Image: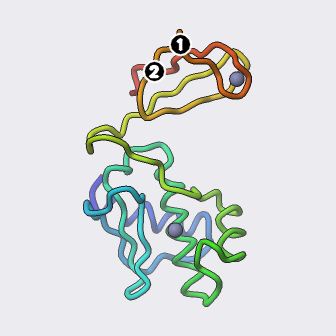
């Protein structure tokens, strides 16, 4: 994804989920390490971590940053601890935290497992399903969609 595609995606999500236009700039910033994105109070622009752009939850990361953006511009509580922030984040389905990226910068892999009762477990690293069980019900785990990893 390039900056132009990112900009269009942020604009589209802003209109779709917030009913308000995004009138500033969204750009990838490879200096972001563990966070998915950043709202810049000074100029209202958004930075996004290019390593997270291919994750399935990238739209939720965009929504998270747009919650900061729209609340700040409308003079409401835009910080994580604010009730406005929590309520709007929940309403639009934004991510609460950036997904953790571990190891080297290439490892944005995501391994998905399903237990016999249907619980989904996602891990950054692959593990042996013969040695681990579902943490919620103790059921056996199966690796899902290994081709997508
Ligand atoms: Zn935030
Ligand atoms: Zn389970």
Residue under the image location 43 percent in, 20 percent down: 146
The image shows residue 79 at horizontal and vertical percentages of 58, 77
Q: Quadrant of the C terminus?
A: top left
The image shows residue 120 at horizontal and vertical percentages of 62, 29
The outermost residue toward the front is 131
Local secondary structure at mark 2:
loop
Between 128 and 64, the residue placed more toward the observer is 128
The image shows residue 135 at horizontal and vertical percentages of 66, 27
Local secondary structure at mark 1:
loop
Between 93 and 35, the residue placed more toward the observer is 35
What residue is shown with label 2?
127
Residue 53 versus residue 121 in the image, above or below: below
Residue 64 versus residue 123 in the image, above or below: below
Residue 10 versus residue 100 in the image, above or below: below
Tag of residue 131: 1
Residue under the image location 38 percent in, 50 percent down: 52
Q: Tell me: 51 left or right of 55.
A: left
Pointer 1 with pointer 2, Cβ within 8 A: yes
Residue under the image location 64 percent in, 86 percent down: 76
Residue under the image location 27 percent in, 45 percent down: 105
For label 1, count other residues whose C-alpha is less than 10 Å away and answer few (under 14), some (14-19) or many (20+).
few
The outermost residue toward the top is 130
* Real-space Cα separation, disc 1 to disc 2, in angstroms: 8 Å
> Closer to us: mark 1 or mark 2?
1
Between 137 and 86, the residue placed more toward the observer is 137
């Amino acid at each position: 994804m390039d900056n132009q595609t990112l900009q269009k995606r942020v604009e589209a999500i802003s209109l779709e989920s917030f009913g308000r236009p995004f009138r500033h700039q969204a750009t990838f910033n490879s200096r972001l390490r563990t966070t998915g994105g950043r709202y810049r109070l000074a100029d209202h622009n958004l930075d996004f971590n290019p390593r997270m752009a291919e994750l399935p939850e990238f739209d939720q990361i965009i929504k998270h940053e747009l919650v900061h953006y729209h609340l700040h511009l409308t003079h409401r509580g835009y910080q994580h601890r604010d009730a406005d922030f929590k309520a709007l984040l929940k309403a639009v389905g934004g991510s609460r935290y950036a997904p953790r990226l571990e190891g080297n910068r290439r490892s944005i892999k995501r391994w998905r497992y399903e237990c016999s009762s249907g619980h989904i477990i996602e891990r950054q690293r692959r593990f042996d399903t013969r040695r681990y069980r579902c943490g919620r019900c103790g059921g056996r785990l199966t690796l899902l969609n290994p081709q997508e990893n």
